[in-house]
Amino acid sequence: MARAKRAAPPSTGRVPGHPRHGKRWYGHGLPYLKLGPLPGHLIVIEGTDGVGRSTQIELLRSWLEVEGYAVSNTGWARSPLLSDTINEAMAGHELNVLTFSLLYAADFADRLEHQIIPALRAGFVVIADRYMYTVFARNTVMGADPAWTRQVFGVAFVPDLVLYLDVDVEHLVPRVLAGKGMDYWESGMHLALGSDIFDSFERYQRRLLDEYDRLADEFGFLRVDARRGIDEIQGDLRTHIAEYLARARSAPPAAQGPGVPGLPASESG
Ligand SMILES: Nc1ncnc2c1ncn2[C@@H]1O[C@H](COP(=O)(O)OP(=O)(O)OP(=O)(O)O)[C@@H](O)[C@H]1O
Ligand SMILES: [Mg+2]
């Protein structure tokens, strides 16, 4: 990608987790939940605001269904429990970073328990439109303590695969202008970074993209060059997912250990 690549920090962010269900918690998990086997796959599409995630996920969904997979989509602020509250809070301009994070964490925990885990249990491919990494990036840019954010999202599973739509501001701006336009939060207007919304959008998104870039190294995202056309991006996403699914099918459970990129987590941790 256009930005200079930093040296990767040693940590993959993968931590030992629950011994039996084939997925690992990122942190403390939901300790009250009894998990049986979870044969499904949790695939995350990460990327900044307006990069084209929804467009790609719709195409992935139909492709996977034709390939014979049952697919479930999930994304931020879609839990029945919290979606109205989050949308109301975001309609105003008063939300601070801690409230924002806690609302999103509650939304996430609700979707995890009532949607993601049941779908994984039933063998679905779950495609997540963003994941905890987006909150990590935003919170760091907004000045929250990264260790606190990570602790809050200890309820999450480590996904099986994270595909990152990697873009730069120069390609992002026309895409957002041609689409739904620049909104208050996605332009970082709450941080008063620029003289107008356009200026603020550029500055805020540059900071976010730098942070995603760092997280991509830390957590081992597979980067897909999202500066290109929709079909080329889709082609790369399908290649990565097909390779992952083939490896997951052929790997005996004993070989599915921590540190094997793109493979389901070990059950022995
Ligand atoms: N590769 C691409 N090249 C040019 N335009 C694109 C590309 N991908 C998507 N678009 C267009 O960019 C706009 C945003 O796309 P989309 O809604 O899929 O993004 P998103 O990442 O889901 O946005 P949001 O963060 O708002 O959910 C749409 O108008 C879409 O048609
Ligand atoms: Mg979208």
Image: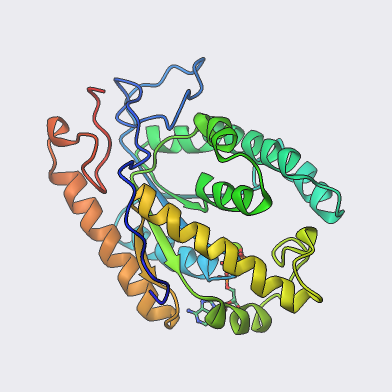
Colour scheme in use: rainbow
Q: State left or right for residue 211 relative to residue 35.
A: right
Q: Nearer the viewer, residue 166 or 235?
A: 166
- Residue 25 is situated, as x and y percent measured from the top left of the image, at 41, 29
Q: Quadrant of residue 59?
A: bottom left
Q: State left or right for residue 52 relative to residue 243.
A: right
Q: Nearer the viewer, residue 121 or 41?
A: 41
- Residue 137 is situated, as x and y percent measured from the top left of the image, at 56, 52
Count of marks overlaid on the render: 0
Which residue: 36% across, 68% down? 224
Give the residue furthest to the front.
Answer: 7
Which residue: 59% across, 63% down? 207
32 over 259 or under it: above or below: above
Q: State left or right for residue 15 relative to residue 89.
A: left
Q: Quadrant of ligand 1?
A: bottom right
Residue 70 seen in the figure: no
- Residue 182 is situated, as x and y percent measured from the top left of the image, at 73, 73
126 over 59 or under it: above or below: above
Which residue: 39% across, 38% down? 158
Which residue: 70% across, 38% down? 103
Q: Nearer the viewer, residue 231 or 24?
A: 24
84 over 164 or under it: above or below: above
Of the 4 image quadrants, the one containing the C terminus is top left
- Residue 223 is situated, as x and y percent measured from the top left of the image, at 36, 64
Residue 85 seen in the figure: yes
Of the 4 image quadrants, the one containing the N terminus is bottom left
